[in-house]
Image (spheres, rainbow, N blue to C red):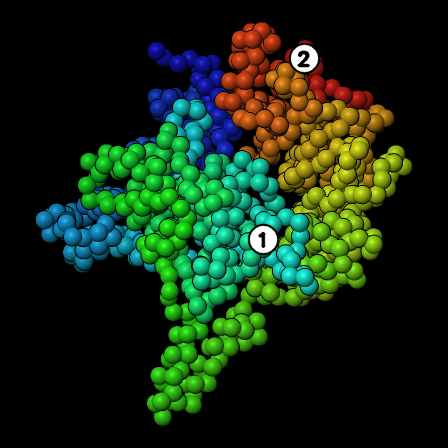
Amino acid sequence: MTTSPIQFAKQFARLREIIQASAASDLKLLQMFDFWPELKDHRDEPAYASYYDEFTPLVENFLTDTNLHDLSLDELTGLREMASDLSLKKPASLVVRRMAKVYCYVGEVDKALQLFAEIAGEQCNIPDSEIYLETLSEFERLQAICSKIPETYSMTKEMLCTIADEWESERGHLWFDRARCLFVEKNTNGKASRGRMRTLIGSAKMAEKNKNGDAVGAATIEVTFENQITTPDDPFIGVVYDGLTAVRAMVTQPHSGILRGSDKSRIQARFQIEDADHAFTGDSIGLAAALVAYAQLLKPDIARYERFISSEVAFTGGIDRQGRLLPVNKDTLSVKVERAFFSSVKYLVLPESNIVVARECVTILQEKYPHRDLQLIPSTHIGKVACDHNIVRAERVCMGQFVAQKAGQYGRMVKIQVPLLLALLWVLLAFFYPRFFNPWFDRNPKYVKVTTRGFEALNKDSIFLWDVEYECEGIEAIPKWQTGDLDGDGMNEIALAPKSLGPCDRNAVLHVYDSEGELLFERTMVQRMPNDDVGDQFVPSVISFQPLNDRHVIITVACRSGPARGHVRIWSRTGDSLVTYINKGFPGPSLLVDVDSNGENEILFCGINNPMASVCLFTLGDGPCNGESPPRAPGPGPEEVYLIVPPTGVSQQLVEQYNCVLGVSEEAPGRVRLIVCENISRIPRCDLYYYFDERMRVTSVLASDSYIAQWEAFVEQGLLPDESLVSVQARARDNVTYWTDSGWVTEGELRALEER
């Protein structure tokens, strides 16, 4: 049936909404691919030219190498055809290169060769009988076929050999601080799912002890994920706490031969997912995080142990406090196995209880790609995983031992004895004391380690740079800190606000230090306003370095409860106060957006408005200005925009005190997505996605699958009216309320006025 222009316009508008709702960039790309046949049928019709002009640059923007990382060969084939139809030569070549690399990973090197020969216009063909020997691994097959390509086919040979060179550089890594993880993610339609492989980066260390030998701080384990402190009840990171408990037992038991600390030693760990463009969920991160922590905690014993995690291994599976591996959901295991199958990894480590299903998945895949040999390593306990030499390489000679051995060996050679020994002595000193003897030592502060009287500045490798001590003891274990380049010289400054300094009366005081440890300025994060009568116990909750228009600033937020207040302050690089703003509730994350289209960014905050019992969004410029949030006396205020997102019927039926913000992001220039949870105290979450245009006017609302399921349950129980999902989403949109010079007005009221 032919689509009318009006129907097509609605479909294209729906495509925009779906793209905005997609958290991951590759899912946005696949949504465009699904829509392409509709647009392709009208590409030569003038009435559809504007859609084509909008669609083409969107595809070009999202067709990047990173967004092809987790796509299947069938998806890549379709994207290649779409890019060719749109005359996008560079994106099309990226897709071909990714397809060729995946074919090489599964041992189908002849198909990769055909792809490159087609691009080069060279009739290059190597008979299978010369290459595919059963004794060759996937990588060896690639090397063999590269060696067989005649030099006359130079372009084809160069492209294929480039993949071989890249693969060779990747496969030999041994890591102290990272491991490959497998995740599962649903597509936007909620029906399909895909596996994702990412690298988890982490560090872990035993906390220092006080004079009595006890670990500092009340909490025995502290985990920071993506630079945010997490708690054991976190649905994603909570399993890491159990894994660290198991690892601590491994490295502190006398029979382990390691005996670092005690079974009550406090562990501080930091983790992040490399190249993550959206949040990941699930408990399968547990095993990988525990292994990274294990390698990190052994690092100080480098003279006796050197345990590395192989880059040829991928991990999936949770872990409990005793170190036992917890099974992966059988419904999602197949896509994880498939993702590992079409990758460069040689081994997949998983819980033993999943091995039967995993082997069935591999067998099915090998029927189509018989040259792929993905080896499954089942295990029941992290201790067994750590002892497997295919996974964790053990008992290797460390650099210090190697240099010492070479010094003894060459020291007996008279002609080169003195100069070589001097050179080796410098190598030893540079290795063990890099701060003083290594000219390439990284002196840029990246992390902060809190001590009982102050803190230590560390570089990206967690190596000590300098420290600060205050006049008295009493800093709590979790102050707020951040590093950032405040003056644009390429070196980071450190901003730190202690949670408490006891009798020193420095609670919620911002201290900013330069890259060498000199104090630049010290400012209070709390500023009294005439109508603000709350007490003194404020807690620092946000410190953020931001490049705001033509200047670098620091944003701070200090909060307290009873009643809730959040003091937002913005500081110049010299410590001048640019903005002082009190939100009647808790302000949260911030990002930069241009809400008035004047070419200058404002700072967008989201949080809770306590009097309205609702999620709020507001924007502040770079000042100078002072003020407080509505409701207040009518009239202009310091904020460009202030709006609230009231709870919906689902939240009201669940008797939640508030809805809450889960995340805010800029989906396109000036366009913002806000994720609001309607049931913060329950699982699964009921989330709504609110989309705002460049004026911060809400354009649409989309409900998550869990929200829809809860709403349908309430409708079936007669607790909510029986209506369409479209009506429910439209009501949530129309209930968004804005503060104006004359008071509150809803989106629905504004739309009604605009339609007159």
Name the residue rendered at 33%, 33% in the picture: 334
Residue 443 picture quarter: bottom right
Above or below, 742 relative to 322: above
Residue placed farthest to the bottom in the image?
Answer: 414
Residue 229, given in percent of the width and then of the height, sits at 61, 45
Residue 305, given in percent of the width and then of the height, sits at 43, 65
Residue type of the residue flagged with mark 2: Ala
Residue under circle 2? 752
Label 2: which secondary element: helix
Question: Any mark on residue 209, and which?
Answer: none
The reply, left or right, for residue 225 in relation to residue 335 is right
Residue 174 picture quarter: bottom left
Name the residue rendered at 43%, 88% in the picture: 419
The reply, left or right, for residue 68 in relation to residue 152 is right
Q: Nearer the viewer, residue 634 or 419?
A: 419
Label 1: which secondary element: loop
Q: Nearer the viewer, residue 156 or 102?
A: 102
Residue 431, given in percent of the width and then of the height, sits at 49, 72
Residue 350, given in percent of the width and then of the height, sits at 36, 42
Residue 736 picture quarter: top right
Determine if residue 51 is in view: no
Name the residue rendered at 52%, 29% in the picture: 20
Residue under circle 1? 264
Quadrant showing the N terminus: top left
Tell me, yes or no, whether the two marked residues, 1 and 2, touch with CB atoms within 8 Å: no
